[in-house]
Image: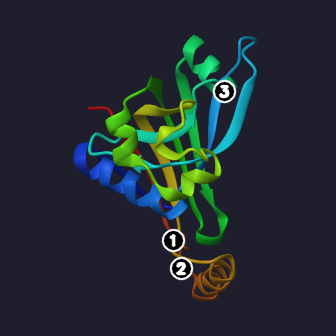
Amino acid sequence: MSNDTNLQNKEAIEKFRQLVKEVNICMFTTLDENQNILSRPMSTIEVDDEGNAWFFTNEFSEKIQEVSKDNVVNLIYAHPGKNTYVNVTGTCTLVIDPKKMEDLWNPSMKEWFPLGIEDPKMCLLKVNTDQAFYWNSPFSKVGLLFKTIASIAKGDKFKEGETGKLDLSQ
């Protein structure tokens, strides 16, 4: 990909929000007490106006123990069908705020929290994002193949899509 874009401040946050909306599920990556890398799929509830990513989780889960010892996390979003990929670094904090949980609550969360907003195990993870790198192409894999062949036939340089760095720190 050749259209590099480096964004900062509100532009970076808006681009991040758009990319996360397309993908939504990320691999939420932490380190355990032995410095082993652990990842698990998590649904992003919201990207707020400061670029923070919010997640619901169980207060007694392993990931809570891991971020309590080392709060540096990595979020990896991938949507191969849309050729959208995002790699995010940040720090994570546990938030137990009933009002914020109510504001972010989504009925689809009942699968994990059957008691709903009243579930005593439920809490929020807030990832204060630092930066993100993204790769985004408007073409499907078949479309990429045809565009590549057309570029070769015409002798043009193929431009697959855009890549960039998002400075999300405020």
Is 123 or 43 nearer to us in this picture?
Answer: 123
- In front of the other: label 2 or label 1? 1
Q: Are marks 2 and 3 in contact (CB under 8 Å)?
A: no
Point out residue 127 in the picture as x, y percentages from the top left corner: 45, 33
Return the residue at label 2.
156
Is 168 or 38 nearer to us in this picture?
Answer: 38
- The type of residue carrying mark 3 is Ser
- In front of the other: label 3 or label 1? 3
Q: Above or below — where is 151 with respect to 50?
A: below
- The type of residue carrying mark 1 is Lys
Is 33 or 76 nearer to us in this picture?
Answer: 33
| Residue 1 in view (yes/no) | no
Give the quadrant of the C terminus. Answer: top left
Q: Above or below — where is 63 with respect to 80?
A: above
Q: Tell me which label, 3 or 1, sits earlier in the chain.
A: 3
Q: Alpha-carbon distance for marks 2 and 1? A: 9 Å
Return the residue at label 3.
61
Point out residue 114 in the picture as x, y percentages from the top left corner: 61, 47
Point out residue 27 in the picture as x, y percentages from the top left corner: 64, 43
